[in-house]
Each structure stands twice: as C-alpha cells, then as structure tokens.
Image (tube, grey):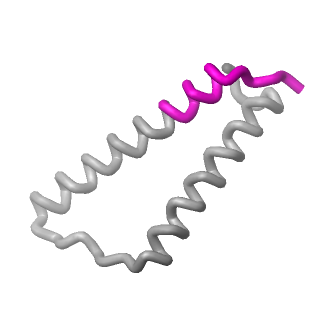
Amino acid sequence: MPYLRPIDRLAYRSQHWSFLLQTTLLQEATRWMSRMPRPRLSGAEVRAVLRRREELHARDLANVEAGLYPR
C-alpha cells in the first residue's frame, strides 16, 4: 500500500476545503438572489455534518493510499 506523505495529506485536505468554499459561496449567492433564508440548524446537526465531512475526507485519503486515485 502506498504511503501518503504529510504534504500529500495537506494537499488533499486543501483541495477538499477549496471545494467546500466554492460550493458554500455558490449556495449563499443563490440564496441571496432567490431571497431564500438559510435553514436554521441545531448544534447537533452542525456537528453531525462536520463529522460526516471528516469521515468522507478520511475515506478519500484511504482510497488514495489504496491506489484507487492518482496522487
């Protein structure tokens, strides 16, 4: 199994954060133009979403280490 260097992990994490930022900005612009308010989320819901995002990132890194994605 290939080993991911810390710089590779940082690169993948940065890429994931850039995707998150882009989609958040697009969603907020769409809400602003359509005048749809952002739904209110409880603290538990926010924590669940953040946990699921971390789990997705961990799975993605595991797939890279397994050779399923190119570096």
Give the magenta part as a residue range: 1-14
Report x, y in % for residue 28.
22, 55
In the picture, which quadrant includes the C terminus? Answer: top right
Q: Residue drawn 19% across and 56% down? A: 30
Q: In which quarter of the image is residue 61?
A: top right
User: Eyeballing the image, is 66 above or below 23?
Assistant: above
Front position in the image: 35 or 14: 14
Report x, y in % for residue 49.
51, 64
User: Eyeballing the image, is 3 above or below 48?
Assistant: above
Report x, y in % for residue 27.
27, 55
Left or right: residue 36 versus residue 12 is: left
Left or right: residue 40 versus residue 20 is: left
User: Eyeballing the image, is 4 above or below 33?
Assistant: above
Report x, y in % for residue 9.
64, 29
In the picture, which quadrant includes the N terminus? Answer: top right
Q: Residue drawn 26% across and 48% down? A: 26
Q: Residue drawn 31% across and 50% down? A: 24
